[in-house]
Amino acid sequence: MFPTGGSSDIISLINTLVFLVLMFFIFTGLNQKFQMALWIRNIRNYLLKIEKIAADARKQCVESLRELGFKGDPEKFVEKFIEFFIIEPVSDEPIGLMKRLEHLLDTRNMRFKNALARALPNTSKYERYNAEVILEVAIALTYIYRIVRHYLILGQKTNNWVLIMQLELQMPQIMRIAETYYRALEAFREVKPIGDSIGPLVAAKLMKFNSNKRTIVEDTIVAEVERKGRKLLIVKAEGPGSNVGKPGEAIKRLVEAYQGKIARIVMIDAALKLEGEKSGEVIEGVGAAIGDPGPEKFKIENVAADYNIPLDSIVIKESLEEAITTMRKEISEAADKVIETIDNILEERTKPGDIVIIAGIGNTVGVAQ
């Protein structure tokens, strides 16, 4: 029976009951459990989407191998490499770290290349390179799925609401990365240039149809071009297959071959932009513009310092999505702006007759030479 006193007494009673219910939820922890259940549900929904696109990436990888005339069972081949791993070298002892890391990376790359060469004997190396990258995309998506699943299960087992909350907050960004990798499959299957191909595209434009090209190191070519009265040594990965080459080793060999006669090194590469920045913007800086795990960059920095060669960088701003999916118009149009910047560097910072290395860094898929 409600107390007398009109509607104000009823409202007061309702407020009291609501307060008591809230206190019950707070002191018993039910509110936290309820919130955790919502987070887990959201994470599971994201995880199902990632699982689906990871499975489809593996399916597309198998289909690509079949189309290339794979000898054997492509499904077993993909499953064999889908969780392939590399153990990083000991970093507590830094002496020789880059050499050890390069050795492991080369061993991993040769493992993939040799396996594909045996399974696809009637294909060109460019087709095998593209198949390798499609496999790498499937590996990356499977890894993302496994990591998210791991932390979800771990958070549930330990009833760790902080871990679940952090994972739920990061899921939109993780999902965005996974979807970007998935969309990248189209470019590699159809051998289209991606945003990261802007460096090799600039190098190819500078080379034009120059016949004076040679392989300087595995999967990497160099061409000699006269421009603005200077001798340019243009370096890029060998296309049009999906390939980044070994530009660090190429630059090192060129500098050593010319015995200190190199006046300048100019590197061109894509760079991740910050949110709100314009795609395709061309900016200058100094240093080795290359996104490798370390060995190639180390070689460039080391040889430039040893021979006291100025190291210029030109980067083209892109988002992650733009970098690994089919090249967009604003990115491709930046190539001519980069060449204008190179001409300015030649005129302002070098003299006629100087020898300059121009390195187009990035994945050269869809970009020949």
Image: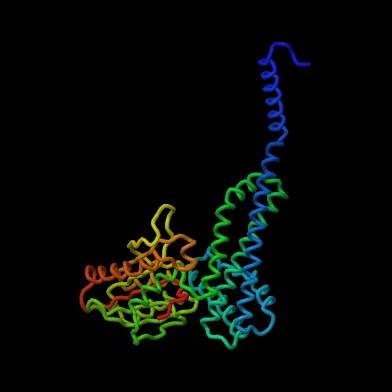
Q: Residue furthest left?
A: 352
Q: Residue furthest front?
A: 6
Name the residue rendered at 79%, 16% in the picture: 1
Name the residue rendered at 34%, 72% in the picture: 306
* Render colour scheme: rainbow
Name the residue rendered at 69%, 21% in the picture: 16
Seen in the picture, residue 210 relative to 34 is either above or below; the reply is below
Q: Residue furthest top?
A: 5
Which quadrant of the structure image shows residue 236? bottom left
Seen in the picture, residue 50 relative to 27 is either above or below; the reply is below
Name the residue rendered at 50%, 76% in the picture: 191
Seen in the picture, residue 279 relative to 119 is either above or below; the reply is above
Q: Nearer the viewer, residue 58 or 350?
A: 58
x and y percent of residue 323 in the render? Answer: 46, 65
Q: Nearer the viewer, residue 306 or 195?
A: 195
Which quadrant of the structure image shows residue 115? bottom right
x and y percent of residue 142 in the render? Answer: 63, 65
Count of picture labels: 0
Which quadrant is home to the C terminus? Answer: bottom left
Which quadrant of the structure image shows residue 319? bottom left
x and y percent of residue 311 in the render? Answer: 33, 68
